[in-house]
């Protein structure tokens, strides 16, 4: 049956997506622009090879190459491969011939959001799109089989597809996807298709090779910082270092004659940029540029003043919101046989992506285009249109693989707006804006600072009868997404403490009260990998260890007694305890600690083994980690994600702290905001134990358990409770 609609060929798609206007010609190399490939310069339309799409998700070339379109962003986490696996599973194609490409957010709008969400964050890349991307593969397979059956004049029911080959079972005739793709592209897709039962999966659940590894190893992969366009200029920028400060003046004449400098421009009302032939020329001139700032009212803000604000929130009744409550804590706590109280602290932290913020923009009165690494192509498009002063239909964003995201490139596209603002002052010329590391440190959207006071009550048998938790600190949603708050409450602050859902507490406590005293300093907060579960896991899991110690009970058994109604959390906890050898003697001087959480829809646990020598030097020997994400699309990628998340989480534990002085961040580069070294990285043993029936996240849940497991192991080794991080500030010598 022929389609009664316009079929957009891949060639037409590329031409419409990557038109560059006057001064540019087709055939320009634009990594990941439109679909990352272009019609060769000078090729006449009538001689250009037609490669019609089977559907929006699948393009199949005559040589059987399968191109799967992925709307989510790849930043090292493996989403690109995982989503391709899911499409390929239903497509029944030859995995060795699969490649991928990014559609553009502009084309998504033009095609009635056919690819749906372009956002990649919250560990939602796969779990929020598994159904419709699988359907994309299933529909494409249906169309291919239908086309083959029509060519043979046989019923579809007699045909089978496997490994990109369609077979007519009764006769044994065969054809390939590449041979029938053009015909399939002309057929009307079915309204509904039946997806495979998980028990029949062949690719999903298998550790297939990642699709992006080779290009990253051989240097072929282009990141935003690498991008080069003909005639492109480079920009370096400096914004007022004090949060909320403004630009007063600058003396462009002092640097205008320096080598390569083209212009010096004000950017919005708080920054100045130098545009030059090379980035280093721009950066050198910017460093020499006399700039005067209006630092504003935040110039007196310091870490000490913020600490005072948080301390007040721990005891105040003003702006306090309840996130979870059952029983009657106020009555039960005074009646407890024994009470335990502790206050914990978690600092500001920067995302510190290896690739600093960057974007390349070209603006004319008719069109604005941006090439950038982004976790949310649609949000980047909106930012570009806003800065360009053009309708969104006249703008486009071409996504590029990210050199790290961790949330920084998700909701925040200040770097895109800046790039467009600079390009707008140089119409028709592409300008690449690249932040310096110092600018990246000074103008992040930081992991929020919080403190937490916990009071627990034990009964006469040493069981936890009451728990009161008061978190004092920043709300990310109040700053970033106020419309997502519920009656003024930021429920995201309660990750790991909620009564139910993706971020439910893993324990049943007869009397429980969890509160948030909202205290928002003028340091911009942001979604930092794991978001609020990072501090909440430390607060709860370390305090549970304190309660177990106060009750004179084994930390594992103490937890188990609270988890009878949480079987999946208990299962991952038992798995790490068994594999780590909990209850059996460790090597001399080595001690163990546990942690367990449910967050982002997954159940995760860890057991850490550490030693601390007489000089207080910490060595993390091993971490055994278990995760139950429901379905495991690629176990090898999950193992890599767990290890990678521990690098990030342990770096935060050991070194991660941004301090404030004079309203500005004091840390400037990796010398004073380091990551852990290879020699510090422990052995990681990952247990992937999918129980099926749900889709949980991977990248963010696992980060949360490493730090509390290590902190609990440090207590076992030294007898010292560490209630604030980073550990670089703590004397770890035995109590």
Image (cartoon, helix red, strand yellow):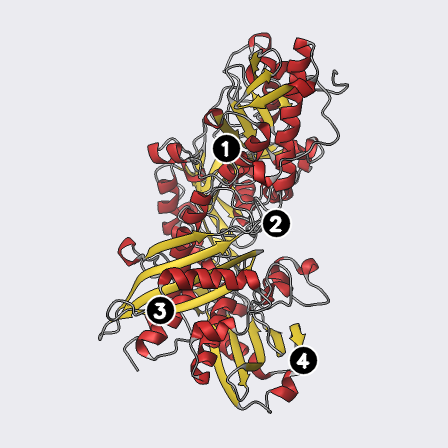
Q: Determine the image quadrant of residue 176.
A: top right
Q: Residue furthest left?
A: 614
The residue that appears at 56% across and 75% down in the rendered structure is: 472
The tag earlier along the polypeptide, 4 or 3, is 4
Q: Residue furthest right?
A: 4
Q: Looking at the picture, does residue 441 appear above or below residue 216? A: below
> What residue is disc 2 on?
693
The tag earlier along the polypeptide, 3 or 2, is 3
**Of residues 186 and 606, the one drawn nearer to the viewer in this rendering:** 606
> What residue is disc 1 on?
430
Q: Position of residue 40 (x, y in %)?
A: 50, 16
Q: Is residue 318 left or right of residue 419?
A: right
**Of residues 428 and 343, the one drawn nearer to the viewer in this rendering:** 343
The tag earlier along the polypeptide, 1 or 3, is 1
Q: Determine the image quadrant of residue 469.
A: bottom right
The residue that appears at 29% across and 68% down in the rendered structure is: 586
Q: Is residue 390 left or right of residue 32?
A: right
Numbered mark located on residue 327 in the image: 4
For the residues marked 3 and 2, what is the alpha-carbon distance in whole angstroms? 32 Å
For the residues marked 2 and 4, what is the alpha-carbon distance in whole angstroms? 31 Å
- Residue 8 visible? The answer is no
Q: Position of residue 531 (x, y in %)?
A: 53, 60
Task: State if disc 4 and disc 2 touch (CB < 8 Å).
Answer: no
Could you say whether the residue bearing mark 3 is in a helix, strand or loop?
strand
> What residue is disc 3 on?
592
The tag earlier along the polypeptide, 2 or 4, is 4
């Amino acid at each position: 049956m022929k389609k009664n609609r316009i079929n957009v060929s891949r060639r037409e798609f590329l031409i419409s997506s990557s038109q560059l206007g006057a001064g540019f010609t087709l055939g320009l190399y634009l990594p990941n622009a439109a679909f990352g490939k272009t019609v060769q310069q000078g090729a006449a339309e009538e001689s250009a090879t037609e490669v019609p799409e089977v559907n929006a998700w699948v393009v199949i070339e005559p040589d059987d190459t399968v191109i799967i379109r992925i709307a989510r962003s790849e930043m090292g986490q493996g989403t690109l491969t995982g989503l391709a696996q899911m499409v390929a599973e239903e497509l029944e194609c030859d995995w060795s011939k699969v490649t991928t490409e990014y559609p553009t957010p502009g084309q998504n709008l033009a095609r009635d959001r056919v690819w749906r969400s372009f956002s990649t964050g919250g560990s939602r890349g796969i779990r929020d799109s598994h159904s419709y991307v699988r359907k994309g593969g299933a529909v494409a397979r249906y169309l291919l089989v239908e086309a083959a059956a029509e060519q043979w004049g046989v019923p579809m029911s007699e045909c089978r597809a496997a490994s990109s080959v369609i077979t007519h079972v009764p006769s044994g005739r065969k054809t390939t996807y590449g041979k029938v793709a053009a015909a399939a592209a002309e057929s009307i897709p079915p309204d509904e298709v039946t997806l495979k039962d998980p028990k029949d999966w062949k690719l999903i659940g298998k550790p297939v090779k990642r699709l992006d590894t080779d290009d990253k190893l051989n240097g072929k992969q282009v990141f935003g910082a690498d991008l080069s366009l003909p005639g492109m200029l480079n920009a370096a920028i400096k914004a007022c270092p004090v949060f909320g400060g403004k630009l007063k003046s600058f003396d462009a004449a002092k640097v205008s004659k320096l080598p390569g400098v083209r212009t010096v421009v004000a950017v919005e009302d708080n920054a100045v940029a130098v545009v030059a032939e090379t980035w280093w020329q721009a950066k050198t001139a910017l460093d020499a540029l006399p700039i005067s700032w209006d630092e504003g009212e935040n110039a007196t803000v310091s870490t000490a003043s913020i600490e005072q604000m948080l301390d007040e929130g721990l005891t105040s009744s003003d702006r306090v919101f309840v996130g979870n409550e059952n029983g009657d804590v106020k009555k039960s706590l005074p009646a407890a046989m024994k009470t335990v109280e502790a206050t914990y602290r978690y600092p500001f932290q920067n995302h510190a992506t290896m690739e600093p913020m960057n974007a390349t923009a070209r603006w004319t009165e008719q069109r604005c285009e941006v090439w950038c690494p982004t976790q949310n192509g649609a949000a980047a498009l909106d930012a570009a249109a806003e800065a360009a002063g053009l309708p969104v239909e006249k703008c486009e964003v071409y996504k590029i693989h990210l050199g790290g995201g961790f949330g920084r490139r998700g909701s925040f596209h200040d770097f895109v707006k800046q790039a467009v603002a600079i390009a707008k002052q140089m119409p028709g010329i592409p300008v690449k804006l690249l932040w310096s590391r110092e600018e990246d440190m000074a103008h992040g959207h930081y992991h929020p600072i919080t403190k937490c006071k916990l009071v627990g009550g034990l009964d006469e048998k040493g069981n936890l009868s009451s728990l009161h938790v008061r978190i004092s600190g920043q709300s990310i949603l109040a700053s970033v997404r106020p419309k997502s708050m519920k009656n003024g409450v930021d429920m995201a602050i309660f990750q790991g403490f909620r009564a139910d859902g993706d971020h439910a507490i893993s324990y049943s406590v007869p009397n429980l009260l969890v509160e948030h005293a909202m205290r928002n300093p003028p340091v911009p907060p942001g979604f930092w990998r794991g978001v609020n579960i990072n501090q909440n896991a430390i607060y709860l899991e370390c305090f549970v260890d304190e309660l177990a110690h106060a009750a004179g009970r084994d930390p594992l058994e103490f937890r188990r007694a609270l988890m009878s109604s949480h079987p999946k959390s208990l299962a991952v906890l038992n798995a790490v305890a068994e594999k780590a050898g909990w209850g059996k003697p460790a090597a001399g001087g080595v001690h163990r600690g546990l942690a367990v959480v449910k967050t982002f829809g997954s159940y995760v646990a860890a057991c850490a083994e550490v030693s601390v020598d007489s000089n207080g030097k910490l060595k993390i020997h091993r971490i055994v980690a278990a995760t139950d994400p429901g379905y495991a699309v690629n176990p090898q990628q999950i193992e890599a994600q767990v290890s990678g998340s521990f690098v990030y989480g342990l770096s935060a534990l050991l070194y991660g702290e941004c301090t404030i002085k004079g309203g500005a961040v004091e840390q400037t580069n990796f010398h004073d905001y380091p990551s852990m070294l290879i020699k510090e990285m422990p052995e990681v043993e990952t247990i992937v134990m999918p129980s099926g029936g749900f889709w949980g996240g991977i990248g963010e849940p696992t980060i949360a358990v490493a730090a509390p497991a290590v902190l609990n192991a440090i207590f076992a080794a030294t007898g010292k409770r560490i209630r604030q991080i980073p550990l670089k500030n703590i004397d770890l010598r035995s109590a």
